[in-house]
Image (cartoon, rainbow, N blue to C red):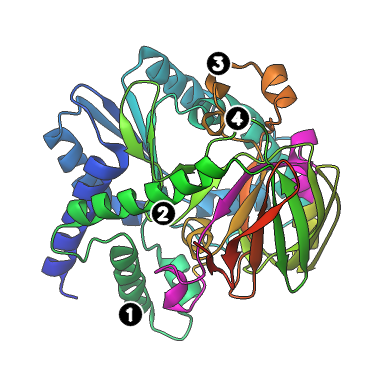
Amino acid sequence: MSDTSHQAMLAKYAEAVVNVGLNIRAGQRLIIRGALPQFAPLTREIAKSAYKAGAKYVEILFADEEMTRIRIQHAPADSFDEFPVWQVQGMLNLIEEGDAAMLSIAGANPDLLNGLDIEIIGKMQQAQLKNWKPIGEKISSNAVNWCVIAAAGEAWAQKVFPDLPLEEAQAKLWQAIFETTRIDRPDPVAAWNEHIVALHERAARMQAKQYSALHYAAPGTDFTVGLPQGHLWISAQSVAQNGVTFTANMPTEEVFTLPDRFRADGVISATFPLSYGGSLIEDFQIRFENGQITKVSAKKGEAVLEKLIATDEGSRRLGEIALVPASSPIAKRGHLFYNTLFDENASCHIAIGRAYRFTLEGGDALNDEEFTAAGGNVSLNHVDFMVGSPQMDIDGIAADGTREPVMRGGEWAF
């Protein structure tokens, strides 16, 4: 791909992100997080599109991921509760003014923290989660229009395509991003609108059923999760509290809802590695009893997984379940992305930790105690991991105990 054609694709990508993902309205301020310096060509195109849509200011918070590794290696051992609270306060101020939109860019090195002290990593992540909690709560209640996208970071590209030279690996990953986000179509915005309608139809079908629980069966998995009264099946688009309709993830192939934090029983096995906090957790299995994680095991990264579920009480319970057919466009690519934004859209998945308030009818108006009593989960974490496969069957269980197929062989049964 020539520089000229790549730049043109970045411009199309930016237009879709601004007009479909964020749906920027005139007068909004856009905050872009997670941008590495190598993503500058993309972020500049996003800024152009945002201003064209009427944004009054675009703030890009660049970050050097290597600084995280340097800090763990060289900072004083008693300094890992430090955090740039000014960033959180600044974002909260913008959100409370009612004119903010937030974009996050995924694309960091999946192996960034490999080989580093797991205790120090845990302390640093705990400080980040605690300080970021007010923003996480705003996002989980759709206080603003927000979106998560990806850019082909160099280290990430080499992880996905290890046998290719860096330049080729990065070009191939960019191509994968453009294809899975429909940017390679003649009219990406029209293609997205068509896709959103199809996902809404799936969510509407599940919503009409109002199952009491779902049962998952696959090799290494025999798992039942309850669904609370008033749960809402969501897909693609949501409406923020500021009235803006937005699409939170690009790409997205899922329909998702709220699991009952009190009702999850059995064993469920991950079908993809989980990239979490710069470390990979592979070949892992989780056991639940009465909604709570009682045991985890992993061939690689088990200590990281133990740290994750020990973050707080809510990290031992579930906050999301999502259904994705095994034949999704991302699954058809036939390789791992080592990035949750992509891998979760290749497979059914569930999330440890914080639930989205908007997946419960009236959830945005509830305080933590009320939300918890209704079956929602409150936590510093929200970490998705993939459980679906072409061998998975899922049954919907009605309130009277009758069952009917929802997915068979990893595909929708209706």
Query: Mark 1 or mark 2, which has the lower sequence index?
Result: 1
Q: Which residues are magenta?
A: 307-336
Distance, label 4 to label 1, CA atoms, is 49 Å
| Position of the N terminus by quadrant | bottom left
Seen as rendered, the residue at the extreme bottom is 163
Residue drawn at x 75%, y 35% is: 314
Residue assigned mark 3: 365
Distance, label 2 to label 3, CA atoms, is 27 Å
Distance, label 1 to label 2, CA atoms, is 26 Å
Residue assigned mark 2: 252
> Camera-side residue: 208 or 269?
208
> Camera-side residue: 210 or 100?
210
User: Mark 3: which secondary structure?
Assistant: helix
Query: Mark 2 or mark 3, which has the lower sequence index?
Result: 2
Residue drawn at x 48%, y 81% is: 162
Distance, label 3 to label 4, CA atoms, is 14 Å
Q: Amino acid at mark 2?
A: Thr
As drawn, 31 above or below 211: above
Residue 237, horizontal then vertical, whole percent: 37, 40
Q: Amino acid at mark 1?
A: Glu
Query: Mark 3 or mark 4, which has the lower sequence index?
Result: 4
User: Mark 4: which secondary structure?
Assistant: loop
Residue assigned mark 4: 230
